Image: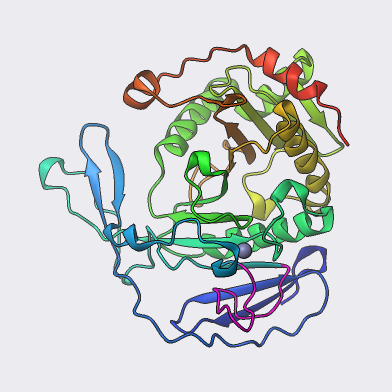
């Protein structure tokens, strides 16, 4: 199957039935079969409603057995070699996406539906959703920001393909591609990779952003993120990178020492609806932003890179795609921990002005 930018997708099954998809920028034959013994699939977890906040909590008790920071020769995300039978059966790859072996959310039975909140007797549904792993490169020692632009473009095409396909599943409400980078924030595999969660409910942050953007639209007949970007362009001081199709800025009310939002100048609901031109222009700004982030202290920065998309079934006229990068590092050797105010109350305290971190990011000399 040929996607945008000429990327070719080949879909296969792993020994235990999970799907794996190869995304190639040039023609490649992907037929290698998974030689590992078939393993039983973990059971689906459950979801409980936190009545105090009306938020769903997914409980996946089977995830304790996950492999933690294995050495390179045991890396499950490297290509398969003679000695190593990894998650990727082929001996090479460009970009692959496969079903997570330890998913917090799983494909549910066909009759699944999200129960209505009903106080203390609210039903406990199974933890419906999809969890996928996105390997950005076969090169174990690389990082997303170090990839060639062509390679990042292929990753973008994989994200778009997954967003499109997962949007078609009845039980899916929200699709969330993201990357955790750095042991500081709990990464368990060093290999450059991200994940995609397809939720069967609206996550709290999406729900809140949807409510706010809907109210804003009702009052102003304008899309909130469009106006926010217009202010950033007008203020200039928090912009750290820009090209013909994208803008990157430290948000006006950043909540982390280093927080960057990257948004297309022409707003779209999600990656699936992003224009080819904007997709083509993403790798350069992504590389610049991540180089600036790593350049601030001259060390690889731990970060969370999160794609906020409009939900699949609602709010598509008011919520807009953007990429949010947050880093908890505030100085070499110093991390911002989410402590009492942030963790217990959700009230963020920043000890640095967003304009100051924007200046630091802008002053990084790119190599
Ligand atoms: Zn690896």
Residue 184 in magenta?
A: no
Q: Can residue 116 be seen by looking at this rendering?
A: no
Residue ranking furthest to the left: 121
Image point 82% across, 31% down: which residue? Answer: 242
Q: Nearer the viewer, residue 53 or 362?
A: 362
Q: Quadrant of the C terminus?
A: top right
Indicate the quadrant where residue 141 lies: bottom right
Q: Position of residue 41 (x, y in %)?
A: 35, 75
Q: Position of residue 236 (x, y in %)?
A: 79, 16
Image point 45% across, 82% down: which residue? Answer: 17
Q: Nearer the viewer, residue 363 or 57?
A: 363
Image point 59% across, 38% down: which residue? Answer: 303
> Is residue 343 shown above or below 80?
above
Image point 54% across, 85% down: which residue? Answer: 34
Q: Position of residue 357 (x, y in %)?
A: 68, 18
> Is residue 248 shown above or below 38?
above
State the extent of the magenta-drawn residues as a range. Answer: 78-94
Indicate the quadrant where residue 4 lies: bottom right
| Prevailing SS of the magenta stretch | loop
């Amino acid at each position: 199957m040929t996607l945008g930018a000429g990327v070719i997708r080949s879909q296969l099954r792993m020994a235990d039935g999970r799907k794996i998809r190869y995304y190639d920028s040039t023609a490649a034959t992907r037929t290698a079969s998974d030689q590992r013994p078939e393993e039983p699939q973990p059971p689906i977890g459950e979801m409980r409603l936190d009545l105090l906040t009306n938020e769903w909590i997914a409980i996946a008790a089977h995830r304790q057995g996950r492999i933690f920071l294995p050495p390179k020769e045991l890396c499950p995300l490297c290509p398969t070699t003679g000695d190593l039978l990894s998650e990727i059966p082929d001996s090479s790859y460009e970009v692959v996406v496969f079903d997570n072996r330890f998913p917090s959310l799983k494909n549910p039975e066909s009759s699944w539906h999200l129960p209505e909140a009903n106080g203390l007797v609210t039903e406990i549904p199974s933890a419906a959703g999809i969890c996928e792993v996105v390997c950005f490169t076969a090169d174990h020692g690389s990082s997303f920001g170090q990839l060639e632009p062509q390679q990042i473009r292929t990753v973008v095409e994989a994200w778009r393909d997954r967003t499109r396909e997962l949007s078609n599943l009845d039980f899916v409400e929200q699709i969330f591609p993201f990357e955790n980078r750095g042991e500081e924030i709990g990464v368990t595999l060093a290999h450059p990779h991200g994940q995609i969660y397809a939720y069967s409910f609206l996550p709290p942050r999406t729900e809140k952003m949807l409510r706010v953007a809907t109210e804003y639209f009702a009052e102003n007949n304008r899309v909130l993120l469009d106006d926010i970007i217009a202010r950033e362009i007008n203020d200039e001081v928090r912009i750290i990178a820009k090209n013909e199709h994208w803008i990157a800025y430290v948000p006006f009310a950043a909540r982390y020492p280093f927080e960057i939002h990257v948004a297309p100048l022409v707003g779209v609901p999600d990656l699936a609806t992003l224009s080819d031109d904007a997709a083509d222009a993403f790798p350069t700004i992504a590389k610049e932003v991540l180089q600036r982030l790593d350049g601030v202290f001259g060390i690889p920065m731990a970060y969370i890179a999160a794609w906020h998309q409009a939900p699949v079934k609602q709010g598509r006229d008011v919520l807009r795609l953007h990429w949010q990068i947050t880093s908890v590092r505030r100085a070499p050797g110093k991390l911002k921990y989410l402590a009492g105010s942030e963790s217990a109350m959700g009230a963020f305290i920043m000890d640095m002005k967003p304009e100051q971190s924007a200046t630091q990011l802008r002053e990084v000399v790119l190599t």
